[in-house]
Amino acid sequence: MLTIYGVLRSRATRTVWMARELGIPFERIDVIQANRLPAPDAPGAPLNTRSPAFLAVNPHGHVPAIDDDGLRIGESFAINLYLAKKHGGPLGPRDLAEDAQMTMWSMWAMADVEPHALAVMYNLVAKPEAERDAAAAKAGVLALERPFATLEAHLAGAGGHLVGGRFTVADLNVAEAFRYAQAAPDLFRSAPHVTAWLSAAQARPHFTQMMAERAAEPA
């Protein structure tokens, strides 16, 4: 049975969403990020990313991680690509070419989108106002202009999806990176195809269910 490690206020959201889209059973074990705890190494501290029990699953010390009948994997996009290929269906690749494209888009989002989108989110909405860095937020927005233009052009000619004309793991992974950029709505005003694509992804029932559960989790 698949076990997913991580609280929902982490990138574990995307793996929970993926598992539900695939319709596969799983158990989720709460593992909180160590930097959210005042004393993560103290006796009695909740299971966290520095706990020896979790480091035995993922020695990199990040969530999410999975244990799939003894196979242990970290890194959310890699996990999702693995699950898509293992379980197949419309979310997974139909051939080697689709597999390569799904991997390409996921790696692009991880390298070119997510770091800048996180800088935008943290410095516009997530951090306490006194800790926000306006220059970092502005730099993040500027850095995202090219990825937004790239995705806008692709979606305009690809029928509203990244690969194969259907919702796949590529859409799910990339949508999760772009979600952080929603703190800067001006980026979306000049990208109608990106806006429609992200809205459609976030209207999927398994996404809305996951986000409702995330909102109910302690901050």
Image (spheres, rainbow, N blue to C red):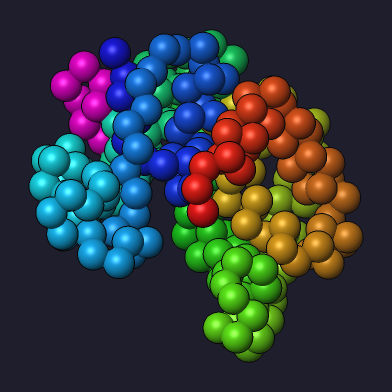
Left or right, 188 with respect to 117, comes to right
What residue is at 67 percent from the left and 60 percent from the top? 181
Most foreground residue, 17 or 195:
17
Q: Position of residue 69 (x, y in %)?
A: 21, 17
Residue 29 falls inside the magenta stretch: no
The answer to whether residue 12 is seen in the rendering is yes
Q: Residue at x 50, y 48 (%)?
A: 218
Quarter of the figure with residue 31: top left
The rendered magenta stretch, by its main secondary structure, is classed as strand
Q: Position of residue 120 (x, y in %)?
A: 63, 70
Picture layout, residue 177 above or below residue 170: below
Question: Magenta stretch?
Answer: 67-73
Q: Residue at x 59, y 15 (%)?
A: 90
The reply to whether the magenta stretch includes residue 70 is yes
Q: Residue at x 57, y 72 (%)?
A: 127
Q: Nearer the viewer, residue 134 or 86?
A: 134
